[in-house]
Image (tube, grey):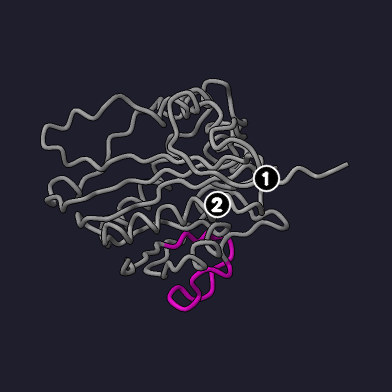
Amino acid sequence: MAVLKTRIRIRKANPADATSLAEIHFAAFKPDVINELMFPKGTTADAMAKSASLLFPPPDRNPKGTSPERLILVAELVPEEGPADAPGEIVAFAKWSLRRKPIPEEEWNVDPPIDPDMLGEGSNIEMYKWFNGTLHRRFREIARGDPMLYLGVLVCSPHRQRLGAGSALVQWGTDLADRLGLISWLEASPYGYPLYKRHGYEDVAVVDFKITETWGATKAEGRDWGEKSALEIGGPLPEGELRTVIMKRMPKAT
């Protein structure tokens, strides 16, 4: 039997994709310790629905027009031969934020509002505040209100890895940053770190989370908590801690 050759196609996401993207997100992060602590009883239908709704919120009503542009891209697996608009299988997605102009400190140096119900039924909002709040504060200390392209989310279906989908989505962003002459930023998990290094991202700072001491969770066999990430600037990772790396990529001339 002939094997059908496939390729990866990148396109902008739309609200009709929201449920599929939420399913991929939770499937990809299911074995992650942060996800396990945020959803200690597993992903509920309500949490899945809330996640989908957050991807495409109502239009921003900021009268100053300084909120970043939200850019959500999907990677689809499609036949190598056939029409360009042939239906494809969504296998990964990325969420980028684009800030074209600098914003004043009173806008960037603030904690974003957090709705206690935003994660849905069965979630641990305090864990979310602890983890994401810490990352947000450290990142804004470094990047401040400068123009930038920021990668907030990159996830790939665990059943469709090593096909180049994640790499294609990162390349889409770096190409955009190069065209606009912008620095691109991200916070790398242990699993994403090698991919971002291959695309030219450099270590800027590490944020080491005391998972075992704070939440009592221990590292399961075979899990990666960042022991090999950013050793030059962060040093060895203490036992029981998880490392996230703030990274940047300078634009290249096009």
Q: Say what secondary structure mark 2 lies in.
A: helix
Q: Position of residue 90 (x, y in %)?
A: 58, 36
Quarter in which the C terminus is drawn: bottom left
Q: Disc 2 marks which amino acid?
A: Gly
Instruction: Give the CA separation, mark 2 to mark 1.
Output: 15 Å
Residue located farthest toward the right when viewing the structure as drawn = 1
In the depicted view, which residue is nearer to us: 83 or 250?
83
Q: Could you classify mark 2 by the number of other residues whose Cα lies within 10 Å: few (under 14), some (14-19), or many (20 or more)?
A: many
Please identify, in this view, whether the residue under mark 2 or under mark 1 is nearer the observer: 1
Q: Is residue 57 above or below residue 228?
A: above
Q: Is residue 91 above or below residue 43?
A: below
Is residue 95 rendered magenta in the image?
A: no
Residue 169: give x, y in percent of width and height: 49, 50
Q: How many marks?
A: 2
**Residue bearing mark 2:** 166
| Residue 171 screen position, x and y as percent | 46, 57
